[in-house]
Image (cartoon, rainbow, N blue to C red):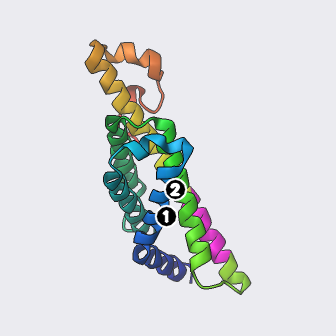
Amino acid sequence: MLDSLSSTLARFIEEKSGEIVKRWAKKVASHASTGSFAKANLGVIERDAYEVLREFERWMSSQATRTDIGRWYAAQGQSFFKMGIPLCEVYRAHILLKNILQKFVEQETVQFDSAIQVSMLREFQQNVDFFFEQAFYYLIRGYAEAMNDRMMELWGLSDNDTVKVFFGRSFYGESKGSDF
C-alpha cells in the first residue's frame, strides 16, 4: 500500500512539476537570500529544478540509487560553483524547493482522511526530508570539490596544501569520489 502511495505521489509530482518549478522560480527570483539566482540564467536554474524533481521521482520509484543521486548532486554542486553562485544561496534555493514540494503535495493532493493515509503522507514527507538531506551532502561536497580544484588551478597548490583548508579525512581529503 505504501509503494502504491509513493508511486502515486511520484506520478503526481511528475505531472505537476511545471507548476512546482514555476512556484519555486518565482520564490527564488524574489527571495532576499537567493539574490545571485536572480542574476543568473533563470532558464538554466529552472531546468535544474526540473531535474531535481526528476531525480526525486526516480529515487521514490526505486529507479535511482543513493549512488546515482550522489553523483548527480555532486555534479550539480560543481556546476553551481562554476556559475559563481554562493554555496549558502544554493543551499537556500534547494530548501525553498523542498518546502514548496512538500507544501504542494500536502495542499494539492486529495485529502487524506484515514489514519493510515495520514501516516502514509507523513512517511512521504520523511522520504522528502531524507532525499534532500542526502542531496545536500553531495551538493555541498561537489561544490567544495570544485573550490578545491579551482584553488589548485589558480595558485598551483597541491593536495597537501589544500588539505589545510578542506581538512584531512573530510568528505574530500584522501577519498575524493570514493564513497558515492
Circle number at residue 23: 1
**Residue 38: image x %, image y %?**
42, 46
From the top left corner, tell me how far across and down residue 32 is, in percent.
Answer: 55, 43
Query: Between 153 and 28, which is closer to the camera in this rendering?
Result: 28
Q: Is residue 38 magenta?
A: no
Main SS class of the magenta portion in the image: helix
Q: Residue at x 47, y 36 (%)?
A: 87
Position of the C terminus by quadrant: top left
Residue at screen point 34% across, 18% down: 159
Element under label 2?
helix
User: Are there few (<14), some (14-19), or many (20+) residues within 10 Å of tag 2?
Assistant: some
The type of residue carrying mark 2 is Lys
Locate residue 80, reporting x and y percent: 37, 41
**What SS does tag 1 mark?**
helix
Can the viewer see residue 108? yes
Start-end of magenta stretch: 119-129
Residue drawn at 52 percent across, 56 percent down: 27
